[in-house]
């Protein structure tokens, strides 16, 4: 069987099911909205039935009503079928009650899902027979990718999309934004950042870069907690810190809220790291019980390749379809995949990794925040605010990224002049690139004892 | 088969028969359009009114001789 043939395979009873659906839709046009919502032309396998369904949709969307007479007229006039009379008369032979529509639609969707899996298995077989990949790991990763795409039936990205569908979704989003109902993307609950980004968009690769000690990990973990607090699942890949270190950071961040009447912290970070009083332990236990509820999964494995990360993220997405955010800490610790890197420079290898992770964001339909170090060039400048050119030695990061943001803390470089420069505790999140938005700077306050960022209300454009 | 389906089937066969007359050049596409509209609204007419309308559109009805054949 050829690879394209698999999608043409007719499974038992599909022809009859397709006919039933068409018969029901003609008799009960009020059910067309259900069909519009759940059924697509590509779910039909029989070419005649597919043509009738397409004509039916067209009639309904343009005229708001359907009938055998109108359908015949359209099929004949536009020469869509050679013998429209026979095709339509065969539909009238079907037993039709409206209640049968949804089970029939489910049957067709199942058939389509099975054909996609069949197609994926054929592609895997061909890939192996043709020896297209270089290492077993690459075969495994490609096979997983194909199966994931085939089993993720709702994600029919490989199917052409109707402009009408796309514009309908855009319009719905627009109206919701106007009514202030939902943000455009995923809010990270830092108003100044959300204002600049209008939320992290699905499928976007977001680079969060900075020199060491600027607070990249802290900011990314703050994003993760803020998102998870709304019961939106988050997946964190930590190639540097282990899971307990991350857990402690989460707890510390929450302890910031607990202060006495004079504003003193009830549990300073130094005490959390040593010995707590009974009262402090009670507060900490309360924080723990709150954090237990958060839907955060952590992979704290060192030496992961981009293929490993993609495979693990796919697995999580498969069991957790509403996964909202992926954080990867950090790019330079991701191991290049074995095999084809012998003659490649480091910059090219990093470029490959970034491209893989951008593809991951698209594949699992989730924003991916990728942390990245910056080269030392920053240190040699008087103005140490990072610039896009500071990424240029690290592959094609700026080319592949949808958003590039830098964390910069002036008081780290000039601690003695912080009061004079008015930068004590201040952090700048510089948006140097936004494919779907404006560039600018969000101002945050960094509380190093609690590895926590909090929002400043003002913003520089 | 339900009465609704029987009626739809009948309309479909009737329309198809008139479409063949269009293919043979005995009726125009404009006349077929009018017949399509008439069949869509068939339920609004009595049998006599429907026959009259049909005769009005194309000058004859099935079973009658087309005028030019007389």
Image: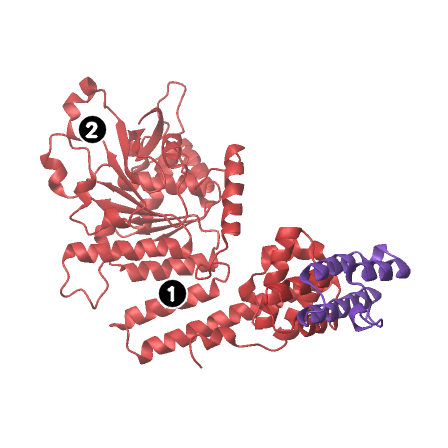
Chain colours: A red, B purple
Rendering coords of residue A267 (x, y %): 35, 31
Rendering coords of residue B69 (x, y %): 79, 73
- The quarter of the picture where residue B23 lies is bottom right
Query: Quick one: A95 or A73, which is closer to the camera?
Result: A73
Q: Please rate how many residues cluster around mark 1, counting C-alpha atoms within 10 Å: few if below 14, some from 14 to 19, many from 20.
A: some
Rendering coords of residue A8 (x, y %): 51, 75
Residue displayed at 40% across by 41% down: A225
Q: Earlier in the sequence, mark 1 or mark 2?
A: 1
Question: Which quadrant of the figure contains the C terminus of chain A?
Answer: top left
- A198 over A39 or under it: above or below: above
- A422 over A305 or under it: above or below: above
Does the image show residue B43?
A: yes
Question: Which quadrant of the figure contains the N terminus of chain A?
Answer: bottom left
**What is the residue that sits farthest to the left in this orientation?**
A380
Q: Please rate how many residues cluster around mark 2, counting C-alpha atoms within 10 Å: few if below 14, some from 14 to 19, many from 20.
A: many
Residue displayed at 30% across by 79% down: A130
Q: Which residue is mark 2?
A: A410
Which-is-in-front pick, marks 1 and 2?
1
Quick one: SS at disc 2? Answer: helix
- Relative side of A198 to A77, left or right: left
* Number of marks in the rendered image: 2
- The quarter of the picture where residue A96 lies is bottom right
Query: Quick one: A139 or A417, which is closer to the camera?
Result: A139
Q: Which residue is mark 1?
A: A145
- The quarter of the picture where residue B44 lies is bottom right
Q: Chain of mark 2?
A: A
Query: Quick one: A367 or A57, which is closer to the camera?
Result: A57
Residue displayed at 22% across by 60% down: A336
């Amino acid at each position: 069987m050829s690879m394209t043939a698999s999608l043409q395979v007719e499974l038992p009873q599909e022809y009859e099911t397709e006919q039933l659906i068409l018969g029901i839709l003609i008799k009960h046009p009020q059910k067309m909205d259900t069909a519009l919502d759940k059924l697509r032309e590509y779910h039909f396998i029989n070419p005649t039935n597919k043509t009738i369904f397409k004509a039916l949709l067209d009639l309904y969307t343009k005229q708001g009503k359907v009938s055998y007479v109108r359908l015949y007229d359209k099929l004949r006039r536009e020469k869509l079928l050679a013998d429209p009379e026979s095709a339509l008369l065969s539909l009238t032979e079907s037993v039709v009650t409206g209640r049968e529509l949804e089970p029939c639609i489910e049957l067709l969707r199942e058939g389509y899902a099975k054909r996609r899996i069949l197609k994926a298995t054929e592609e895997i077989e061909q890939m192996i027979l043709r020896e297209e990949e270089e290492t077993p790991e690459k075969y495994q990763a490609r096979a997983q990718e194909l199966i994931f795409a085939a089993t993720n039936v709702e994600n029919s990205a490989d199917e052409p999309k109707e402009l009408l569908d796309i514009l309908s979704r855009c319009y719905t989003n627009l109206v919701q934004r106007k009514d202030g109902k939902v943000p455009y993307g995923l809010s990270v609950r830092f108003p100044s950042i959300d204002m600049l980004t209008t939320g992290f968009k699905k499928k976007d690769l977001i680079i969060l870069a900075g020199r060491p000690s600027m607070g990249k990990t802290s900011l990314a973990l703050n994003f993760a907690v803020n998102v998870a607090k709304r019961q939106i699942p988050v997946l964190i890949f930590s190639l540097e810190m282990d899971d307990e270190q991350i857990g402690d950071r989460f707890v510390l961040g929450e302890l910031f809220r607990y202060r006495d009447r004079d504003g003193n912290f009830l549990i300073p970070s130094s005490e959390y790291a040593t010995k707590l009083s009974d009262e402090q332990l009670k507060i900490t236990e309360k924080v723990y019980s709150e954090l237990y509820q958060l839907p955060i999964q952590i992979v704290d494995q060192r030496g992961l390749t981009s293929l490993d990360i993609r495979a693990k993220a796919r697995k999580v997405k498969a069991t957790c379809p509403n996964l909202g955010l992926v954080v990867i800490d950090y790019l330079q610790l991701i191991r290049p995949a074995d095999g084809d890197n012998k003659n490649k420079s480091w910059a090219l290898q990093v470029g490959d990794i970034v491209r893989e992770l951008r593809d991951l964001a698209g594949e699992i339909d989730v924003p991916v925040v990728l942390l990245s170090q910056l080269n030392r060039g920053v240190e040699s400048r008087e103005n140490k605010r990072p610039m896009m050119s500071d990424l240029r030695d690290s592959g094609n990061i700026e080319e592949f990224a949808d958003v590039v943001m830098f964390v910069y803390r002036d008081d780290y470089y000039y601690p003695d002049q912080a009061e004079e420069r008015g930068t004590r505790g201040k952090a700048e999140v510089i948006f140097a690139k936004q494919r779907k938005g404006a560039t600018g700077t969000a101002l945050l306050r960094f509380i190093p004892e609690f590895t926590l960022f909090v929002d400043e209300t003002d913003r520089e454009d | 088969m339900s009465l609704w389906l029987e009626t739809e089937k009948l309309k479909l066969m009737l329309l198809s028969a008139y479409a063949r007359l269009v293919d043979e050049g005995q009726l125009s596409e404009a006349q077929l359009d009018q017949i399509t509209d008439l069949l869509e609204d068939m339920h609004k007419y009595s049998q006599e009114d429907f026959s009259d309308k049909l005769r009005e559109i194309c000058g004859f009805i099935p079973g009658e001789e087309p005028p030019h054949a007389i």
